[in-house]
């Protein structure tokens, strides 16, 4: 089960993600989150409440972040839990999306 | 669609039959007792036939001598072949409703109700039955298709190799679905062997489609390019091209080894795959960790090929993440545990070794591939 909340700040929008990111999160990420954040220049994905990401979830994150980057946005992924970070490291997400995403 | 009317009163039967026939229902069977009804359904000594009788709805009187309608309903509903068969009770008295519904009745018709009510209830029960039949048939057909797809997917996996100085065995444990795990190996020169294991992102049919389309490239691609760097780059280009019109990110993780038995040199790339484990006779465990990003994501991919020379008999264990993945648990720890466990089993003959490791996957819902390459002295 995946849910999210948007919190607008002065210069950025924060997406508080909660739950597992897998194929079931697809519609929400593509149809709700992506359009909602596309109007802002700086986007933060808060992963503090994300406990599990599977291979489909990785695909969704890569698509989302690289689409936003291509549109000239700055994206950061924050507060990644250690067990999720291990998956990111295995797949070398920082190589794919750029190290600045995790800084 | 056919309707069975069960009632001990001949008068009632002919009354109901008359209404239904006038409304255009032509296939009507009748029974004057619960036992006669069970006989029509082929139920005998609490055993139902493998295929249900051709009945789509039962109108069942509750109060009958011998077995009453509620007991009959309970008996019929006990059998899986009749679990979807709607039963409508005929009754003159509401006091038995609770029991009747508990027994598996779907609806009721009070005796003396107007004709249109009877017909409306019959019509809606038959409509539901028809929809359930369609859905059930579709499920059966899909199930058969899935079995066939699983069989096909299995049939393209490389057969074991058992030679003096090298043994390669693999095992693919399929879940209920098809999925995107696949292994491949080939002899690519006098003393050289190429081994590839890949895991397409996602699960189910789409992952299986992708893995099969990649499989069709492998004989040509691996046989022609052989070198890890080149194989990696070419796979990446091919996948990007093949799925360039898909809006989904299509990628796979892979590990590819090129083994030269003469020079004892092993070269590999690991594209985002969990580390393979090289278990030496001396007890050393080498993790063949990631060298590059997964395949199919970026136009540019650096192969970053690694290599090492083996100097004693070694088993190299490759696996897909289904073997170690548990939500919320550390992959690093799981890999370390797998390492020490497999080191303990290292002495087993290769095929048995693979079997034993694969047992770790028994309770998994994900597909799992396990390969072991046994390099003798």
Image (cartoon, helix red, strand yellow):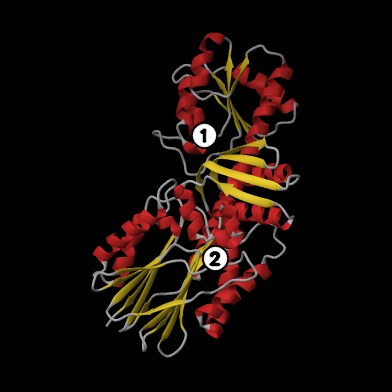
Residue B161 falls in which quadrant of the image?
bottom left
N-term mark: 2 or 1: 1
Q: Are marks 2 and 1 in contact (CB under 8 Å)?
A: no
Which residue occupies the extreme bottom position in the image? Answer: B190
Q: Residue at x 44, y 56 (%)?
A: B322
Between B166 and B34, which is closer to the camera in this rendering? B166
Q: Position of residue A82 (x, y in %)?
A: 45, 48
Position of B169 relative to B356 (above/below): below
Which quarter of the rendered picture does the N terminus of chain B lie within?
top right
Query: Which mark's residue is nearer the viewer, 2 or 1?
Result: 2
Position of A6 relative to B178 (above/below): above
Which quarter of the rendered picture does the C terminus of chain B lie within?
bottom left
Between B99 and B266, which is closer to the camera in this rendering? B266
Disc 2 and disc 1 on one polypeptide chain: yes
Q: Residues within 10 Å of mark 2 (few under 14, many from 20)?
A: many
Q: Is residue B272 visible?
A: yes
Between B306 and B247, which is closer to the camera in this rendering? B306
**Marks 2 and 1, Cα distance to the nearest angstrom?**
52 Å
Which mark is drawn over residue B83? Answer: 1
Which mark is drawn over residue B207? Answer: none
Subunit ID for the residue under disc 2: B
Position of B107 relative to B305 (above/below): above
Residue that mark 2 sits on: B293
Question: Helix, strand or loop at disc 1?
Answer: loop
């Amino acid at each position: 089960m995946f849910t999210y909340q948007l919190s607008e700040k002065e210069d950025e929008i924060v997406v508080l993600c909660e739950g597992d990111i897998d194929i079931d999160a697809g519609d929400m990420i593509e149809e709700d989150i992506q359009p909602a954040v596309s109007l802002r220049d700086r986007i933060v994905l808060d992963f503090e409440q994300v406990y599990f990401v599977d291979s489909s979830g990785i695909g969704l994150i890569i698509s989302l972040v690289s689409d936003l980057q291509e549109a000239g946005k700055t994206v950061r992924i924050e507060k990644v839990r250690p067990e999720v970070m291990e998956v990111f490291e295995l797949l070398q997400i920082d190589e794919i999306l750029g190290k600045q995403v995790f800084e | 669609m056919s309707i069975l009317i069960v009632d001990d009163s001949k008068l009632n039967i002919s009354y109901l039959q008359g209404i239904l026939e006038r409304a255009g229902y032509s296939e009507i069977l009748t029974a004057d007792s619960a036992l006669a009804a069970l006989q029509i359904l082929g139920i005998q000594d609490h055993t139902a036939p493998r295929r249900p009788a051709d009945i789509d709805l039962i109108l069942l009187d509750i109060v009958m001598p011998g077995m009453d309608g509620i007991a009959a309903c309970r008996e019929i509903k006990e059998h899986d072949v009749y679990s979807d068969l709607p039963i409508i009770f005929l009754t003159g008295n509401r006091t038995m409703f609770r029991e009747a519904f508990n027994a598996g009745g779907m609806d009721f018709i009070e005796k003396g109700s107007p004709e249109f009510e009877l017909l409306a209830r019959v019509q809606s029960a038959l409509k539901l039955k028809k929809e359930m039949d369609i859905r059930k048939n579709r499920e059966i057909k899909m199930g058969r298709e899935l079995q066939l797809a699983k069989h096909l997917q299995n049939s393209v996996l490389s057969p074991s190799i058992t030679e003096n100085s090298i043994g390669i065995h693999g095992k693919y444990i399929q879940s209920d679905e098809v999925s995107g795990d696949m292994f491949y190996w080939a002899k690519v020169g006098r003393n050289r062997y190429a081994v590839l294991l890949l895991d397409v992102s996602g699960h189910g049919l789409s992952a299986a489609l992708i893995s099969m389309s990649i499989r069709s490239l492998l004989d040509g691609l691996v046989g022609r390019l052989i070198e890890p760097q080149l194989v990696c780059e070419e796979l990446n280009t091919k996948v990007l091209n093949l799925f360039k019109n898909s809006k989904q990110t299509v990628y796979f993780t892979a590990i590819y080894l090129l083994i030269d038995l003469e020079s004892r040199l092993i070269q590999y790339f690991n594209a985002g795959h969990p580390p393979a484990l090289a278990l030496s006779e001396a007890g050393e465990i080498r993790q063949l960790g990631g060298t590059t990003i997964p395949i199919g994501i970026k136009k540019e991919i650096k192969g970053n090929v690694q290599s090492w020379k083996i100097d004693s008999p070694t088993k190299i264990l490759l696996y897909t993440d289904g073997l170690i993945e548990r939500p919320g648990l550390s992959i690093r720890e799981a890999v370390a545990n797998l390492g020490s466990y497999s080191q303990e089993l290292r002495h087993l003959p290769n095929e048995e070794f693979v079997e034993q490791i694969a047992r770790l996957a028994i309770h998994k819902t994900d597909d799992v591939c396990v390969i072991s390459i046994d390099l003798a002295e």
